[in-house]
Amino acid sequence: MMNKTLKNDYSAAKRRTDVGNFIFDAIIFIVLAFVVVATVYPFWNTIAISLNEGLDSLKGGIKLWPRKFTMQNYKNLFTTDRIFHAGIISISRTIIQTVLCVFCTAILAYSLSRKEFVLRKPLTTILVISMYVNAGLIPGYMLIKNLHLLGKYAVYIVPGLVDIFNFILVRTYINGLPDSFVESARIDGANEFRIFMQIIMPLIVPSIAMICLFTAVNAWNSWFDTYLYASNKPRLHSLQYVLMSILQASQNQSASAADANSMAVAASSGASTSISTPISTRSAITVVATLPILIVYPFVQKYFVVGMTIGGVKE
C-alpha cells in the first residue's frame, strides 16, 4: 500500500513537472520568437522598400513585400563608375586593415602576456588608459597631418594598426594557455617569433576570428575618416562615404515642400517613374552596405561565440 501511494505521488509530481516544463518552454519559445521577429522584420522591410518603386513608397504601407517591384533603385545607385571604384577602396582597406590590425594586435598581446617581460604591467596600464582618455578630434587630426597621411591611402591603415579592446581580449585568451607550450618550444631552440607564429597563433584561432570580425566590420562601415582626411581625394573615397553622399544628394533634391508635394501627387496618380526617393535610396543603400557583413558573419559565428566566452572572462 505504501509503495502504491509513493508511486502515485511520484506520478503526480512527474506530471506537474512535465506541465511546468512545457509551460516554461512555451514562454521561452514565444519570447525568442518575438525577439527574432523584432530583429529580422526591420531589415526585411528595408529590403521590400528597396525593391519597390520610389514614388509608390511615399504612400507607405509596405510591410513584407514590395507593392510595385522594381530594381530601379539599385540601378540608380550603380549608374556611375564612382561607386565601383569606391567599392574597391572599401574592400581593399577592409582586407589590408584586418590582416595588419589582427597581426599587430595579436603580437602585442603575446609580448605583453609574457611574465618575464618586466615592462608588461606599466605598458598594459598605459594602453588601457588610452581606451578611456581620448585627446579629441583636433589633436588627432593634427597628428595625422604631422605624419603626412592626409589624402593618402595609408590614413586608412596606420591609425588602426592596434585596437586596445581587441588587444585585451587576445591577451586574456593567451593568458589562459598553459606556459608549458612556450617553455617546450624554447627548450627546442625556437625564437619568440617562431613560437608566436607556430605555437600561439594556431591555439588562439577563435580569438583571432572574433577580432577579425570586429575589425572588418569597423573598416567596412567606416566613412568618417574619409570625410576628415580624404574628402578632397575622390580616388580615395570609400563605399560608405559615397553612399552617404548619394543619400545626402537625394535628400537635398527633395528637401523643398514643392518637390515633396509633386512626388506625393505623382504617387497618388499611379504614375510609373524611375525616380528614386530618399526613402527608397536609403533602403537600397542600407542593403548594399549590410549585405557583405551578413554573408561573412555565418562563417565566423562559432569562433565569435568561443572567442567572446574565453577571451572575455578571466579566472
Image (cartoon, rainbow, N blue to C red):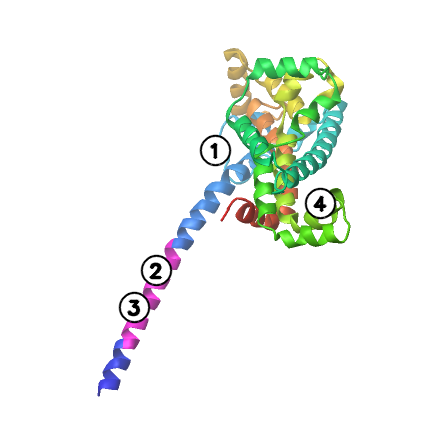
- Taking the image as drawn, is residue 12 in sight? yes
Residue at mark 1: 61
Mark sitting on residue 23: 2
Residue at mark 4: 196
Q: Residue at x 56, y 28 (%)?
A: 126
Q: Quarter-wise, where is residue 161 in the image?
A: top right
> What crowding class fits label 3: few (fewer than 14 Cα within 10 Å), some (14-19), or many (20 or more)?
few
Amino acid type, mark 1: Gly
Q: Is residue 5 above or below residue 244?
A: below
Closest to the observer, 305 or 261: 305
Q: Who comes first in sequence, dot 3 or dot 1? A: 3
- Image coordinates of residue 191 in percent, x first then y, are 76, 45
Amino acid type, mark 4: Phe
In this rendering, position of residue 197 left or right of residue 178: right
Check if residue 19 falls in the magenta segment: yes
Mark sitting on residue 16: 3
- Image coordinates of residue 103 in percent, x first then y, are 70, 38
Q: CA distance from mark 3 to mark 1?
A: 46 Å
The residue stretch that appears in magenta: 10-27
> What crowding class fits label 4: few (fewer than 14 Cα within 10 Å), some (14-19), or many (20 or more)?
some
Q: Nearer the viewer, mark 4 or mark 2?
A: 4
Q: Nearer the viewer, mark 4 or mark 3?
A: 4
